[in-house]
Amino acid sequence: MSSPLIDPAANGSKTTAFLTDSTLCIGCKACEVACKEWNGIAADGLTWSGFSYDNTGAVGHSTWRHVKFVEHAPEPGFGGNSGDISSWVFSSDVCKHCEQAGCLEACPTGSIVRTEFGGVFVQPDICNGCAYCVVSCPFGVIQKNKNEGMAFKCTFCYDRQKAGLEPACAKACPTESIKFGEINQLRLVAQERMRELRGRGMDDAQMYDPTETSVEGTHAFFIVRGDPKQYNLPPKPEIPTIYLKEGWKQAAIGSAGLVLGSLVAFAIAGRRKSQSSSAGASLRGSPSSPRRYRIGKEVSRRSR
């Protein structure tokens, strides 16, 4: 069984993380089972899909840890651990607990909070089921349970961490594919592992931790082979709030244009009204006087 790489409370640091090494994952799904047992989550994935051995499909409201089966057509002459090609690999997916979490920023009730360990935690008793968090997650992790009317995801085993224990999934992993510990120490471990894999000829191995995007890094990073997208890891995850500045800018421009257009319309309407009044006064004044004068002269002639 795995153990924490470092005491999370050591050196005054409590910021923890997961390191999931897909090159060590054997697809046993012990992490899925341990997660469900500890958190009391209902069983799922019992329907045979016919498309894959991976029947749970993805993380969701009832699957907080999910072992993804990355399946490819086998190539003759290449085994599963070949340094040249990976034909069938596994990776345990989980909530990334982003440094800048879209779900947390979108929550209108304060149900989603940041814990002292750096994880993102959903308080079900405060959740109103609006699902704003669902559409704001760049990884598609959090999901609303329509039967219960609330959103759920990985809790980062907050209760276990408070008690000084490591998360259930990391505890149950038989190959230490899931490592848990202080975040900076785990990054060093990941770098060392990358050097080891490259030395074995696995040049397609890479570490996934999107620190350069608007999520500013995660508390669950991965070592994978090949394209991260096949592991449900987007190449450039972004939180929706980065578009707020441009959105407000466009709204301001639109509002300014509307106000300016209204002022111009009122000015034109006022000018036309003024011109109409002047023309009316002119018609009532100068043309009528000579006419009355001529009519008066005709009457006086007739009277003579």
Image: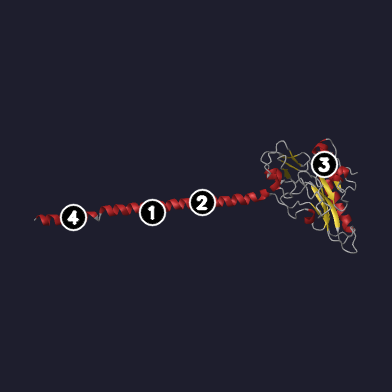
Question: Can see residue 4?
Answer: no
Instruction: Count every numbered label the image shows and give the total.
Output: 4
Which label sits on residue 46? none
Q: Are marks 4 and 3 in contact (CB under 8 Å)?
A: no
Residue 233 located left or right of residue 195? left
**Alpha carbons under labels 2 and 1: distance apart:** 21 Å
Q: Nearer the viewer, residue 269 or 57?
A: 57
What is the distance, in whole Å, between disc 2 and disc 4 at their CAs?
54 Å
Q: Position of residue 71 (x, y in %)?
A: 83, 57
Amino acid carrying label 1: it is: Arg
Query: Does residue 271 lie above or below 146 as drawn?
Result: below
Tell me the CA gap for discs 1 and 3. 75 Å
Mark 2 sits on what residue?
A: 258
| Quadrant housing the N terminus | top right
SS for dot 3: helix
Disc 4 target residue: 293
What residue would you read off at disc 1?
A: 272
Q: Are marks 2 and 3 in contact (CB under 8 Å)?
A: no
**Residue 198 in sight:** yes
Residue 36 has which mark? 3
Q: Position of residue 189 (x, y in %)?
A: 86, 49
Label 4 to label 3, Cα distance in Å? 107 Å
Residue type at mark 2: give it: Leu
Mark 4 or 3, nearer chain start: 3
